[in-house]
Image: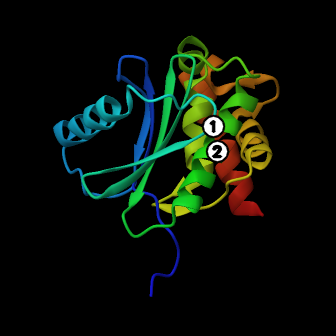
Amino acid sequence: MESCPSIKNILLLDSEGKRVAVKYYTDEWPTLAAKLAFEKSVFTKTLKTNSRTEAEITILDGYIVIYKVIQDLHFFVTGGDDENELIIATVLQGFFDAVGLLLRNNVDKMSALENLDLILLCLDEIVDGGIILETEASVIASKVTANSLDGSTSLSEQTISQALATAREHLARSLLS
């Protein structure tokens, strides 16, 4: 009996199938070449579909892939063939909606790249080690904004020394509490 559902990877690709933000949670794709080949095959298989209004599902190489497209961004969540499609779809919708909240509904490649730190933190808040942590978009977005702000400066606007000082301060606070 499986203890809890797991996610294999979450992919955010552009309109050409190139990486914007990706996170793999298993070693089933051990090399960068294997990961890029999987991303290309997923993108190619889903390119001709119209998944702009609601999430679509496909099976590729024994994996369930649920995906959605908005403007020039393609969102994918992959699970094993024995996973519940509704749970994978819930992860996708949580990621999709959280990115929309974080980018203030201006979801396109340029905004995503400008706020890549927020998107990567979003991935970390949703899934850890393949285990689903959170799927509610407002909770994910609030955790990401709480973690990424130190005063009014986002992590992307800090210098390396400021970022290290912030990280040191957060670590000290977490050790003391």
Q: Position of residue 120 (x, y in %)?
A: 54, 36
Instruction: Name the residue carrying label 2.
Output: 93
Please tell me which residue lies in front, 27 or 156.
27
Please name the amino acid that badge 1 sits on. Answer: Phe
Q: Residue shown at 24%/52% (left/top)? A: 61
Residue 62 in the image: above or below residue 68: below
Q: Foreground: 18 or 157? A: 18
The mark found on residue 104 in the picture is: none
Which residue is found at the position 56% from the left and 44% from the top?
123
Relative horizontal placement of residue 121, taking residue 84 as reference (left or right): right
Rendered view: 145 above or below 62: above
Image quarter of the N terminus: bottom left
Please give left or right for residue 166 compared with residue 164 in the image.
right
**Residue 96, how many percent across, how many down?**
63, 37
Cβ atoms at labels 2 and 1 below 8 Å apart: yes
Judged left or right of residue 41, residue 43 is: right
Among all residues in the image, which is located at the extreme bottom?
1
Q: CA distance from mark 2 to mark 1?
A: 5 Å
Foreground residue among 87 and 145: 87
Is disc 2 placed on a helix, strand or loop?
Answer: helix
Say left or right for 80 vs 107. left
- Which residue is tagged 1? 96
Looking at the picture, which amino acid does disc 2 mark? Gln
Crowdedness of circle 2 by 10 Å Cα count: few (<14), some, many (20+)? many
Q: Residue 70 in the image: state x and y as whole percent.
A: 58, 24
Q: Nearer the viewer, residue 15 or 170?
A: 15
Q: Position of residue 23 (x, y in %)?
A: 42, 43
Color style of the picture = rainbow
Q: Secondary structure at mark 1?
A: helix
Q: How many dots with numbers?
A: 2
Quarter of the C terminus within the rendering: bottom right
